[in-house]
């Protein structure tokens, strides 16, 4: 039998989805599974977007332009203008979700064997796409004690063939919102060492901290964008998505943006090779232009309440530690056990309360450093508050049961 490629053998499984068969098995046993493992919001997709599909009258669902349908591009252009990030037509391309934008960004700046610096814990798909392209991820370790903010010595992680630094702001899986000084240090590092800067900003509006001086939060309530950092005009690449912003994950509509014309020309060539982003998804996304100005404020308030509930519930569990997330809708929690993945499996295979259990994401898959994150889980607080409270009660009770089951059985010493 012919051998598979090295990338096929090395591709990491998703920590978000690799235990999905256990969840399916639980459902087959009649157990309801609360999914806190994946960032799938339960907030309703806005009415104009859901109504858009019913307006489609063409007899054929045909290819669209490689860079995106005009209506969808109009929605993105209006969104960026209202966000204070105006872009010309040549400076962005519509993609198949943020995933393709991330893949295009990495492919445009790095060759096989090149390196990309990424603060960890990191978005797990960074590892998958880097493996696909033959790129090495060099982790910049961040700690729970510092709220997963950046260490001072960024330059110490540079190595030969480093081509870019990639970060998420607000962070997935950490919920960290970088301060202005942190982002300026990234910009200075890029300028000094001739690097690209790739910023994943899909949670831009989901920020819960105030706009204090130096916070990295603007008066509008959104996080500071890579496109607003001085000195990065030719280096900055924005990865974006409508998925979480509008509870539109299944539509798979994203964007990649840069003010570097040579880079964007390459991205358009990549886009031609995959023909077009999803046409029906773009029609749904185009209805974003019909939403009112208060949409994000309402959504942000909902997630802030969920964050507060999740942090309070997790901190009430003996031995659990977690920082308070400043943005996105995730919290990383360190559990008082050596193997968090075993606990996640235990919840799905062996534990339930009133016919319900909870699925979490083992955090070891959010690290590039071997052996890191073994005691941590990522919790996505994407359920309405009553369901979220039930799901976290299951975590608390399940952890006690798991610890009891894991204790060595005492044996009487023979006399």
Image: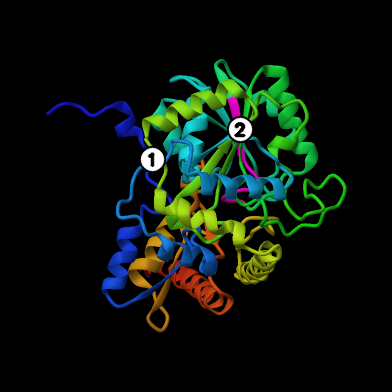
Name the residue at the front extreme: 58
The color scheme shown is rainbow
* Residue 9 point in image, percent of width and height: 30, 33
Between 279 and 207, the one lying in front of the other is 279
* Residue 102 point in image, percent of width and height: 50, 37
Give the CA separation, mark 1 to mark 2.
Answer: 32 Å
Residue 346 visible = yes
Q: Secondary structure at mark 2?
A: helix
* Residue 245 point in image, percent of width and height: 58, 57
Q: Secondary structure at mark 1?
A: loop
Name the residue at the top extreme: 160
Residue appearing at x 30%, y 51% in the figure: 60
Residue 382 sits in which quadrant? bottom right
On residue 91, which mark appears? 2
In which quadrant of the rendered image does the C terminus lie?
bottom left
Among the two numbered marks 1 and 2 on one chain, the one whose residue lies closer to the N terminus: 1
Name the residue at the right extreme: 213
Residue appearing at x 48%, y 29% in the figure: 268
Residue appearing at x 77%, y 33% in the figure: 184
Callout count: 2
Does 50 appear in magenta? Answer: no
Does 166 appear in magenta? Answer: yes
Residue 188 sits in which quadrant? top right
**Crowding at label 1, few (<14), some or many (≥20) Cα neighbours within 10 Å?**
some
Residue 414 visible = no
Between 353 and 288, the one lying in front of the other is 288
* Residue 314 point in image, percent of width and height: 61, 67
Q: Is residue 324 above or below residue 398?
A: above
Residue 298 sits in which quadrant? bottom right
Q: Which residues are magenta?
A: 164-174
**Crowding at label 2, few (<14), some or many (≥20) Cα neighbours within 10 Å?**
some
Q: Which residue is mark 1?
A: 12
């Amino acid at each position: 039998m012919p051998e598979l490629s090295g990338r096929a053998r090395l591709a990491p499984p998703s920590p978000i989805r690799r235990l999905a068969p256990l969840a399916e098995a639980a459902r087959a046993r009649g157990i309801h599974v609360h999914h806190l493992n994946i960032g799938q919001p339960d907030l309703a997709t806005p009415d104009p977007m859901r109504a858009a599909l019913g307006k489609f009258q063409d007899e054929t669902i045909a290819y669209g332009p490689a860079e995106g349908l005009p209506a969808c591009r109009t929605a993105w252009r209006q969104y960026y203008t209202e966000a204070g990030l105006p872009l010309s037509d040549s400076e962005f391309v519509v993609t198949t979700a943020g995933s393709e934008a991330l893949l295009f960004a990495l492919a445009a700046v790095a060759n096989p064997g090149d390196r990309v610096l990424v603060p960890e814990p990191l978005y797990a798909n960074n590892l998958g796409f880097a493996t696909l392209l033959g790129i090495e991820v060099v982790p910049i370790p961040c700690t729970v004690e510092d709220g997963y903010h950046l260490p001072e010595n960024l330059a110490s992680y540079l190595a030969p063939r480093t081509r870019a630094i990639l970060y998420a702001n607000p962070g997935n899986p950490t919920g960290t919102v970088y301060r202005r000084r942190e982002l300026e240090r990234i910009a200075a590092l890029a300028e000094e060492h001739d690097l690209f800067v790739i910023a994943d900003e899909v949670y831009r509006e989901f920020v819960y901290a105030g706009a204090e001086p130096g916070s990295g939060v603007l008066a509008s309530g959104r996080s500071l964008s890579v496109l607003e950092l001085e000195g990065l005009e030719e280096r900055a690449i924005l990865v974006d998505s409508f998925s979480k912003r509008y509870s539109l994950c299944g539509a798979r509509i994203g964007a990649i943006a840069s003010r570097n014309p040579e880079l964007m020309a390459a991205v358009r060539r990549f886009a031609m090779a995959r023909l077009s982003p999803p046409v029906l998804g773009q029609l749904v996304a185009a209805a974003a232009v019909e939403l009112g100005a208060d949409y994000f404020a309402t959504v942000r308030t909902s997630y802030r309440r969920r964050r507060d509930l999740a942090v309070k519930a997790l901190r009430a569990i003996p031995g659990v530690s977690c920082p308070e997330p400043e943005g996105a809708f995730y919290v990383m929690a360190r559990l008082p056990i050596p193997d968090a993945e075993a606990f996640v499996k235990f919840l799905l295979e062996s534990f339930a309360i009133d016919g319900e259990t909870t699925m979490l994401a083992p955090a070891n898959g959010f690290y590039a450093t071997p052996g890191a994150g073994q005691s941590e889980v990522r919790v996505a607080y994407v359920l309405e508050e009553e369901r979220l409270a039930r799901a976290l009660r299951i975590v608390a009770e399940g952890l006690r049961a798991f610890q009891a089951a894991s204790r060595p059985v005492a044996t009487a010493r023979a006399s």
